[in-house]
Amino acid sequence: MFPYPAKQTAVRTAAVAAFAVLALAGCGTRAACPPPVGSAPQGSKPEAVKPDFGFKLPRGDKSPNELIANSVYKLLSDRHCKTAQKLMSQTEGNITWRDFEDPREVLLFQAAVELCGNDDKAADPQQAAKLWNAVPQLYGNWNLIGWDVATTNNLSWHICETYRAVASAIMERPKDDFECERGERPQQVEAYLSLQGQGPDPRELVQ
């Protein structure tokens, strides 16, 4: 009965549908495309991933000798934290804390023990930081840490890796920032070495 208006309505409906398809495909000339589902709001930046500076010891050199540094290192790398603490506290037997060649090594490995945590021993980063920070106060600096006391030609892999791991965890910086540097051994360390193993436990001097 009303052929023209019906035809006009059909044409207009088809035109609207076609425009909608074009708008979605090309987002129109002025309208912005709708953001994809699950996308971040415009202008926002992805959250930066915070670096992990947790205490970790690499598993590499497994020297068979019975030096205390190697023994404690092996226990810590296997996360036998409580057993490592017992060895660090030992005063009698084949291996004791007095077998460390350098008093700074005692503080270093005790700090490593404090950073080690598992089901049977909680980590204590605050105590580890105390031990670490005591070295400049008591023994000058970390020069020649890990280097052979007698000749300074041989570097202990175990001591150096422990130094770098502890430094990274406490200072919250990459391990590559820390090297076992040469230089003059601090006079305080030389004085301790002159006592030929009869000096006090360095840990007892940490307040």
Image (spheres, rainbow, N blue to C red):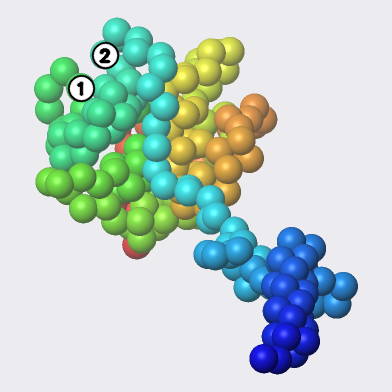
Q: Nearer the viewer, residue 100 or 64?
A: 64
Q: Check the image and report above or below for 205 versus 21.
A: above
Please say whether residue 161 is visible from this viewpoint. Answer: yes
Q: Nearer the viewer, residue 185 or 88?
A: 88
Q: Check the image and report above or below for 144 versus 200.
A: above
The number of numbered badges drawn on the structure is 2
The reply to whether discs 2 and 1 touch (Cβ–Cβ < 8 Å) is yes
Quarter of the figure with residue 62: top left
Marks 2 and 1, how far apart at CA: 8 Å
On the image, the x and y values in percent for residue 30 come to 85, 77
Of the 4 image quadrants, the one containing the C terminus is: bottom left
Left or right for 34, reference 175: right
Residue beneath the point at 63% across and 40% down? 177
Q: Nearer the viewer, residue 12 or 187?
A: 12
Residue beneath the point at 77% across and 65% down? 22
| Disc 1 target residue | 95
Left or right for 16, reference 149: right
| Disc 2 target residue | 66
On the image, the x and y values in percent for residue 172 come to 53, 52
Residue 28: give its label: none
Q: Nearer the viewer, residue 108 or 76?
A: 76
Mark 1 falls on what kind of element?
loop
Residue beneath the point at 40% across and 37% down? 56
Spot the residue most to the front: 1
Mark 2 falls on what kind of element?
loop
Mark positioned earlier in the residue sequence (2 or 1): 2
Please say whether residue 105 is visible from this viewpoint. Answer: no
Spot the residue most to the top: 64
Q: Classify 10 Å Cα crowding around label 2: few (below 14), some (14-19), many (20 and above).
A: few
Q: Check the image and report above or below for 12 versus 36.
A: below
On the image, the x and y values in percent for residue 14 come to 72, 73
Left or right for 134, reference 73: right
